[in-house]
Image: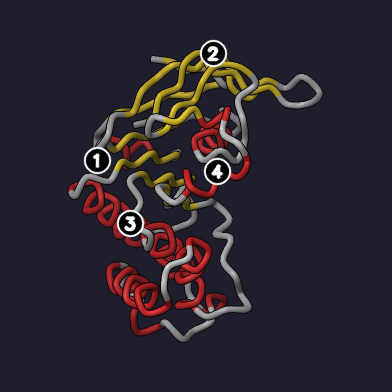
């Protein structure tokens, strides 16, 4: 499902964010990326989503070498990806419902089908009663649940989450992780970047330990 082979990522100025990474995440796995700030966790996720391209090596996602995709093909790759960012990237000039509808609108879904899917996703994260609210009026935990709804509304095969519980208290963090667990139980592949060692210990799964851009046992 996700395979890195001898992947390096070097930025202008010579900073090497990732060095010689090789690993595989199988279909239906829930895998964690852990490591200190600056270890390369976010860069790794960006390579999977084709937000960045590797300097060398290959990144294969669902059978496609994403580093060699044409720009016009990237949106088709991302239709099978759910992305949850650290900074939310919510649209504060649109309602909760409109935020969740956006990926479906971009993908060209009919309005009626989009509304059905968006309300189902909001119901899944217990935000259906707030569909007309502005995201800025939501609590931090509610905003994170809104990000989860937007990520899953297109029913992706893979969900990538960058520190999805980093700014949440233990109760909200537990809710988010239980949602991820339920997605994984129906076959969704999850790759989650986190500092939370206790969470990793609780939910298990494959763990990739990054430090200074390198994998460590």
User: Marks 4/1: CA distance?
Assistant: 31 Å
Q: Which residue is mark 3?
A: 155
User: Marks 2/4: CA distance?
Assistant: 24 Å
Q: Tell me where residue 18 sits by quadrant.
A: top right
Label 1 Cα neighbours within 10 Å, binned few <14 / some 14-19 / many ≥20? some
Label 4: which secondary element: helix
- Label 4 or label 1, whichever lies nearer to me, is 4
Q: Earlier along the polypeptide chain: callout 3 or callout 1? A: 3
- Residue 74, disc: 4
Label 3: which secondary element: loop
Q: Earlier along the polypeptide chain: callout 1 or callout 2? A: 2
Q: Earlier along the polypeptide chain: callout 2 or callout 4? A: 2
Q: Earlier along the polypeptide chain: callout 3 or callout 2? A: 2
- Residue 114, disc: none
Residue at 39%, 20% (x, y): give it.
Answer: 23
Residue at 40%, 59% (x, y): give it.
Answer: 169
- Label 4 or label 3, whichever lies nearer to me, is 4
Q: Tell me where residue 142 sits by quadrant.
A: bottom left
Give above or below for 205 relative to 15: below
- Residue 20, disc: 2
Q: Which residue is mark 1?
A: 203
Q: Position of residue 214 (x, y in %)?
A: 52, 17
The reply to whether dot 4 and dot 1 touch (C-beta < 8 Å) is no
Residue furthest right in the image: 13
Q: Earlier along the polypeptide chain: callout 4 or callout 1? A: 4
The residue lying toward the viewer, choosing from 166 and 119, is 119
């Amino acid at each position: 499902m996700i395979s890195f082979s001898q992947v390096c990522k070097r930025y202008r100025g010579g900073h090497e964010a990732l060095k010689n990474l090789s690993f595989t995440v199988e279909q239906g796995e829930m895998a964690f990326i852990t490591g200190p700030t600056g270890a390369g966790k976010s860069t790794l996720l960006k390579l999977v989503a084709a937000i960045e391209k590797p300097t060398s090596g290959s990144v294969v996602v669902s059978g496609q070498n994403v580093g060699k995709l044409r720009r016009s093909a990237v949106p088709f790759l991302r239709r099978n990806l759910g992305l949850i960012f650290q900074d939310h990237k919510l649209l504060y000039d649109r309602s909760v419902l409109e935020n969740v509808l956006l990926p479906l609108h971009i993908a060209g879904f009919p309005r009626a089908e989009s509304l059905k899917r968006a309300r189902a996703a909001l119901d899944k994260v217990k935000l259906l009663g707030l569909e007309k609210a502005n995201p800025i009026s939501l609590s931090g935990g509610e905003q994170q649940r809104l990000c989860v709804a937007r990520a899953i509304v297109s029913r992706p095969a893979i969900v990538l989450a960058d520190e999805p519980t980093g700014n949440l208290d233990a109760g909200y963090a537990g809710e988010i992780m239980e949602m991820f667990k339920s997605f994984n139980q129906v076959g969704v592949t999850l790759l989650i970047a986190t500092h939370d060692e206790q969470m990793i210990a609780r939910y298990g799964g494959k763990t990739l330990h990054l430090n200074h851009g390198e994998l460590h046992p």
